[in-house]
Amino acid sequence: MGMAAAEWKFHVLAVDDSLVDRKLIERLLQKSSCQVTTVDSGYKALEFLGLRQGTESNDPTALSPSPQEVNLIITDYCMPGMTGYDLLKKLKESPAFKNIPVVIMSSENVPARISRCLEEGAEEFFLKPVRLADLNKLKPHMMKTKLKNQKLEEIITPSNDENGTVAAVEPEIKDSVEMEIIKMLPIQSETEPKRVLLQVVQQEEQMLSNNKRKSMEEGLSTDRPRPRLEGIATAV
């Protein structure tokens, strides 16, 4: 699991019928540490994702047995057969792919076209040629996906690791320390009165012993003069 997390990269599917534009966007994305897959049409994009095209199935949401995991799709707007806008609509109609961010590219600055794509659910609309500064706008999507994967890994790791991991062990260690502290607290509360009581008893015993010794000494001191007094009286 640790190795998989270390090797994970943000996966972008780039769709463009122009070879030059595909190579350009691929190079820019790779500079941003992304894994990039390129295809030259909307149909091939659907095929790669495992989403069967409408000519093969009347259900636009139908998936093939092994859909590919993609974190973001960037597509050209003007392409033969299926435009980038058509591809966007297909993706947003699919429950499996409707949450994947889609970015549209175009060499034509047509406000109506841009608005239509954004209203349909596109995250961004880039004018060609795409620059590295444009791709910096994708970083929030990259960070969001990375954090999501890290949270999923934290949830899955403890349950799948038979030997246990640091994440799974730390709460147990913390709990055991807390339990030891909790166990010690009542012992201290119980032994403290006992200790005080023992000290009181010892003090009382000491006082009794002292009183007894004092009484014995006083008894001896009162007995000794008597023979002397009697002796003196006899002598007289």
Image: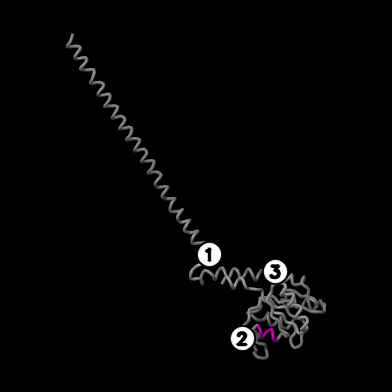
Which residue in the protein does label 3 denote?
140
Q: Distance between the residues labelled 2 and 1?
A: 39 Å
Tell me residue 169's x, y (percent).
Answer: 50, 63
Counting residues from the start of the chain, the first of labels 3 and 1 encountered is 3
Residue 148 in the magenta stretch? The answer is no
Q: How far apart are marks 3 and 1 (CA)?
A: 29 Å
Tell me residue 64's x, y (percent).
Answer: 61, 86
6 above or below 84?
above
Contact, mark 2 vs mark 1 (Cβ under 8 Å): no
Contact, mark 3 vs mark 1 (Cβ under 8 Å): no
Which residue in the protein does label 2 denote?
64
Which residue in the protein does label 1 denote?
166
Q: Using the image as rendered, state which of residue 103 and residue 7 is in the foreground.
A: 7
Tell me residue 93's x, y (percent).
Answer: 67, 81
218 above or below 37?
above
Q: Nearer the viewer, mark 2 or mark 1?
A: 1
The local crowd at label 3, few if under 14, some if 14 to 19, many if 20 or more residues have their Cα within 10 Å, is few
Is residue 100 visible to the viewer in this orientation of the structure? no
Counting residues from the start of the chain, the first of labels 2 and 1 encountered is 2
Indicate the amino acid at tag 2: Ser
Q: What stretch is highlighted in magenta?
A: 43-48
Question: Element under label 3?
Answer: helix
Q: In which quarter of the image is residue 95?
A: bottom right
The local crowd at label 2, few if under 14, some if 14 to 19, many if 20 or more residues have their Cα within 10 Å, is few
Q: Using the image as rendered, state which of residue 137 and residue 97 is in the foreground.
A: 137
Question: Residue, x 26% and y 27% (percent of image)?
Answer: 216
Tell me residue 66's x, y (percent).
Answer: 60, 84
Q: In which quarter of the image is residue 152?
A: bottom right
Is residue 204 visible to the viewer in this orientation of the structure? yes
Indicate the amino acid at tag 3: Pro
Q: Using the image as rendered, state which of residue 173 and residue 83 is in the foreground.
A: 173
Q: Using the image as rendered, state which of residue 135 and residue 82 is in the foreground.
A: 135
